[in-house]
Image (cartoon, rainbow, N blue to C red):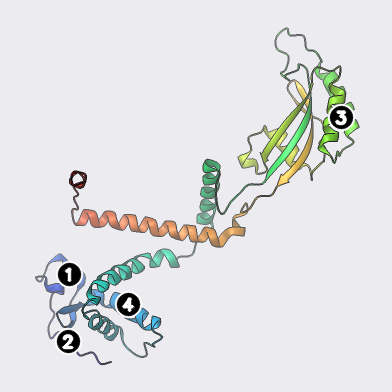
Amino acid sequence: MTVWLVLATAVVPACGEPAGTQKAAECGPVLARVGDLRLCAGDVELLAEQAAGLRRELGLESGEAGRLDLAVEYLALVQMGSFAEARKRSLVRGYLDRMFEEAETRPVTDAELQQAHRDEIGKYMTSGESDLYRPTFIDANAIMVGCFPDGHPPEGDEEPVLTMEQARELAKEIAAACGGRVADLDDFLSIARRFMRGNPTVDIKEYTRVFQDPRLARTPRPLHRAITSLEDNGAIAAPLESPGAVFIVRRGVTYPGKGEDPQSIRDELSRRVILSRKRTAFREQLDRLRERYRVRTWPERLRGSE
């Protein structure tokens, strides 16, 4: 295909704007005329990339065509009748592609990756949903031996049912009965009920869905460490003291999570980072354009027409 054009013989302000105007200065000199359209220096790269992309889609080679020739080719094609409206949409898309190029090509840093991972954790903690992240949960049970039935420490002149020393001794006896491991939860509960007879301060505590990640822990830190330090289902921790009580903790079922290590979902997180960059760039550019063109809207008129 041969495209005939007339090169500008002088520096003509872009888009028909008077010389010295802001738009003429931004667009640069006119390098070619294609029908009624003028090709400004500032638009060559954008239009040339559109032409090259069109050639690629059609399986054609760009060959040795220069950037100016490609830009002229594109302008010649877009004047074909109904293609004119498609030209406008294509130019907008080309402008956005150029605007997003930096966001897409700049490497994702470790700091951005970590922040995206924290954002995904926050999303899960807020909504309970995430397609990338789910924390590991652990179920646990404990036999509590308290100074009082509710496990609170003696206050003032309160007379405890068991002293802390007595609670420790009874907890050691219960721990010995467990033997370091109780494979079946029902067997562990049976041991607890056996020691509850005649001991009103012995009780069973249930801890469901304990977060393995200490950053998310809602259980007391010593208890959380005791649960997560146990190797697997059925393991029994050494007696754990708290003010007013002693606990014999058994680790239960573990519910594996996903995406807990950001490196394991690096590709997905990188895509989130790039998307976030593009959204930020788009919002900032729209704000600049609104300010530049002094955009005003009258939404009340829209409501009035309904």
Residue 99 visible within the image: yes
Q: Nearer the viewer, mark 4 or mark 2?
A: 4
Q: CA distance from mark 3 to mark 2?
A: 96 Å
Q: Earlier in the sequence, mark 1 or mark 4?
A: 1
Check residue 178 in the rendering and tell me which mark sits there, or answer none.
Answer: none
Three-letter amino acid code of the residue under disc 3: Ile
Q: What label sits on residue 191 in the rendered view? A: 3
- Left or right: 172 in relation to 140: right
Residue beneath label 1, please?
25
Q: Based on the displayed image, in which of its 4 quarters is residue 162 positioned? A: top right
Q: Amino acid at mark 2?
A: Leu
State the quadrant of the N terminus.
bottom left
Kind of residue indicated by mark 1: Ala
Can see residue 109? no
Nearer-N-terminus badge (4/2): 2
According to the image, label 4 marks what residue? Answer: 50
Q: Residue at x 33, y 78 (%)?
A: 49
Callout 1 crowding tier (Cα within 10 Å): few <14, some 14–19, many ≥20: some
Quadrant of res 248:
top right
Check if mark 3's residue and mark 2's residue have beta carbons within 8 Å: no
SS at circle 2 = loop
CA separation in Å, label 1 and label 4: 23 Å
Residue 34 at x, y percent in the picture: 18, 83
According to the picture, the residue beneath numbered tag 2 turns out to be: 7
Which is more N-terminal, label 3 or label 4?
4
Distance between the alpha carbons at the discs numbered 1 and 3: 87 Å
